[in-house]
Amino acid sequence: MNEGSRGEQGHFDLEMFQRDWQIAQITPGRHMLGVWLKESEQAVGQADFMDENPDDGMPWLGLLMIASPFHRQGFGTEAFTRLAEHFRADRGWTALRLGVLPQNTPALAFWRHLGFASLGGAEEDMVGRNVIVLERQL
């Protein structure tokens, strides 16, 4: 939607992923995961979450991204379902929050379809963009 290397909006390359991975490794409570196809072991996406957002003390899903060739095949829903099970059963979380850019209507529709509801209003994310904060009970 808004981050791109070399000025290409929407382009996310290996160098950007490696930068994000390095930052995640030094950020307490932040975790990055890969989303893989079980049968072929092909990487199809990634997820990023925080145990506790320092602003509100809540667990946050920072990212669930599925590569575009795999959109609309249920991989995002399955990945989130597995994450939600892990968050509830293994971490004891009762709710999860995330932020979506207001202009990202496909993402808003996806998260609402999965039961997330707006907490009302927009907040600034870590880089100063306004996002709609959504929450779901686990």
Image (cartoon, helix red, strand yellow):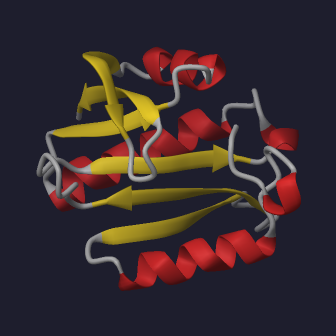
Q: Give residue 12's position: percent from left, percent from top.
A: 77, 58
Res 78 → quadrant: top right
**Residue 55: percent from left, percent from top:** 17, 50
Q: Is residue 18 above or below residue 95?
A: below
Q: Nearer the viewer, residue 74 or 106?
A: 106
Number of dots carrying numbers: 0
In the rendered view, tell whether residue 69 sits above or below residue 117.
Answer: below
At x 43% / y 31%, what residue is drawn?
A: 130
Taking 131 as reference, is 3 left or right? right
Residue 110 appears at what percent x and percent y?
A: 56, 22
- In screen coordinates, is 87 left or right of 112? left
Please give left or right for residue 19 compared with residue 44 in the image: left
Residue at horizontal 48%, vertical 41%? 80
- Assign the N terminus to one quadrant of the image: top right
* Nearest to the observer: residue 99 or residue 59: 99
Residue pictured at 48% horizontal, 24% vertical? 111
Location of the C terminus (image quadrant): top left
Q: Residue at x 45, y 16 (%)?
A: 112
Which of the 4 quarters of the picture holds residue 20?
A: bottom right
The residue nearer to you, when weighing 44 against 51, is: 51
> Could you say where residue 44 lies in the image, as x and y percent from the top left?
75, 55
